[in-house]
Image (tube, grey):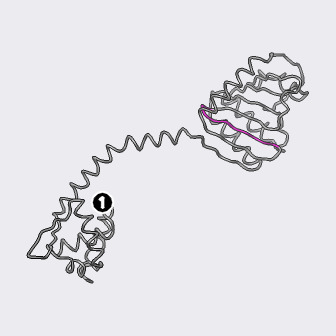
Amino acid sequence: MTNFWTNNNMLAKKLEKFGFEPKEATLYLALLELGEGNIKELSLKSGLKRTTVYHVLDSLKEKGLVSQSLKGHSARYVAEEPNAIGGHLFEQQKLFQKTLPELLSITNTLQKKPKVKFFEGMEGIREVYNMELEHKDSELLRWWSGEYDVLKDDYMANYYMPERIKRKIWVRSIAPDNAFIRKQKSTDERFLRKIRIAKLNLLDQELEITLFGKDKVAIKSFVDNFALLIESVALFKTLKGIFELQWMSLEDNKYQENDSQIN
């Protein structure tokens, strides 16, 4: 028993990498060393219980790695040559190739499901803004509340805005009608921005919603200090359609106010 385990433990581990269960590997190696054996002999050689040996032999026979014969009234078992393992692996490979398209179809289905990521605090909100900057030479579509001042630092003016302009990322924003927004609108062209104002405060909103890339919807709350990033082609296309309809319905009025470098 000791010699068997000492000599074959590493080999059994290698067989497990070829798809053998641990007990299958143990019994197959024991049978190889015996050349031929009955249940009792196999149990003694492998260290497995007799009832276990029966079950494992059935599994090895299904894989074509063990054959059975009768000598008198006793069943004898013989391990097939190790080359048979290669044949078994070849059959598994063929089965895998047939099954692969079905597995990929499941993956494609999963990929179509929305992915939602939660970002906490102002640092998390900045992280989502940074993601918007990854799409160079693109366009952002934004329902804007104009609440950037709650970031309480120079992130927007000293980093986000310069980077957005440097990367030639235009933004179209639909925003509520107030003095702050009108001041921003007066500098649209300079800051690669187009703002259309929803009059009569129809956009009394606390959330900022931005569409970017081809499937990303960013929702930022400056009241509760969190951001959500949803990756969904269906949601993106639906919201983009709503944005474009609303954009076309709003007048492109010009305002002349003092310069500002927000957004």
Give residue 261's quadrant in the image: top right
**Percent x, y for residue 55?**
29, 69
Q: Which residue is mark 1?
A: 18
Residue reaching furthest to the left? 72
Majority secondary structure in the magenta region: strand
Q: Which residues are magenta?
A: 213-222
Decide if residue 65 is in sight here: yes
- Crowding around mark 1 (Cα neighbors within 10 Å: few <14, some 14 to 19, many 20+) is some
Give residue 141's quadrant in the image: top right
**Location of residue 96 with respect to 164 vertically, above or below:** below
Amino acid type assigned to the residue bearing label 1 in the image: Phe
- Looking at the rendering, in which quadrant would you find the C terminus? top right
**Percent x, y for residue 103?**
41, 44
**Location of residue 74 with respect to 125 vertically, above or below:** below
For residue 232, side relative to residue 81 (left or right): right
216 falls in the magenta region: yes
Residue reaching furthest to the front? 73
Residue depicted at x 28% and y 80%: 47
Question: Is 239 or 61 nearer to us in this picture?
Answer: 61
201 falls in the magenta region: no
Q: How many marks?
A: 1
**Percent x, y for residue 159?**
74, 38
Residue depicted at x 70% and y 32%: 164
**Percent x, y for residue 165?**
71, 29
For residue 65, side relative to residue 174 (left or right): left
For residue 95, side relative to residue 150 (left or right): left
